[in-house]
Image (tube, rainbow, N blue to C red):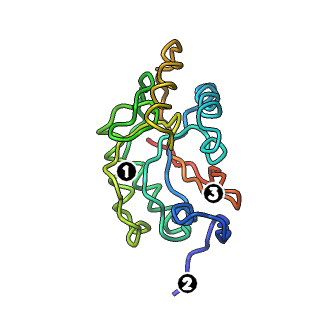
Amino acid sequence: MPTSEILTEYVIPPKNWEKWKTEYRFGAFYIFPPEPIRTKINQFRKKYDPQSQTYCDAHISLTIPLPCAIDSKDIKEFINILAEFKKFIITYEQPSAYPGISGVVLRVFPEEKIKEIVKMLELSSPFRDAIPRKWPFSPHITIAEFVSKERTEQILDELSANNISGSFDCEEISYAVPDVNFCFTERFKFKLS
């Protein structure tokens, strides 16, 4: 039986990668806001969490990391899954503290629609051997993570004068993978119907 062709490159994780980074070797699914929204949010991320901004542009993390490389058969499965979903409008709120932990996020809606996309992707065969989700899924765009409670309050205070909330059309779901510097790039974009 012939095997499917691997369609993108994956790095061998360098020894300096922390364990959580190695889990992302084969990437995951994301929603990236369109321009100019992406650049606007990136500016806040660069100011308040420059390390995380070097990893990835502003995004909504969707799935847990994939456990293995994807091939053409997997791409077809993802195309079929995502074709079942119609384009929709995502709205994002003013910055708030991430519930239960320190950090600043933009909560995004409609939660149930996004959760359904995540559920269907994570039920697909490429996710069969994936590491289980550690926390319940909560859609958001991160402004700053790994900051103290005090720093969270400072950031929220500084951002309160900015009108950051808004909306955008979600027309595609992206598959992104990190390079050797743990910088994620989009490898495939899957159109919604």
Outermost residue, bottom direction?
A: 1
Camera-side residue of 147 and 89? 147
Label 2 and label 1: CA atoms lie apart by 30 Å
Instruction: Say few, some or many: other residues with alpha carbon within 10 Å of mark 3 (under 14 / 14 to 19 / 20 or more).
Output: many
Q: Position of residue 68 (x, y in %)?
A: 51, 71
Q: Which residue is mark 1?
A: 118
Outermost residue, front direction?
A: 150
**Looking at the picture, does residue 16 appear above or below residue 61?**
below
Residue 178 is labelled as 3
Label 1 and label 3: CA atoms lie apart by 20 Å
Q: Amino acid at mark 3?
A: Pro
Q: Amino acid at mark 2?
A: Pro
**Looking at the picture, does residue 103 appear above or below residue 56?**
above
**Nearest to N terminus: mark 2 or mark 1:** 2
Q: Amino acid at mark 1?
A: Val
**Looking at the picture, does residue 169 appear above or below residue 163?**
below
**Nearest to N terminus: mark 2 or mark 3:** 2
**Cβ–Cβ under 8 Å for marks 1 and 3:** no
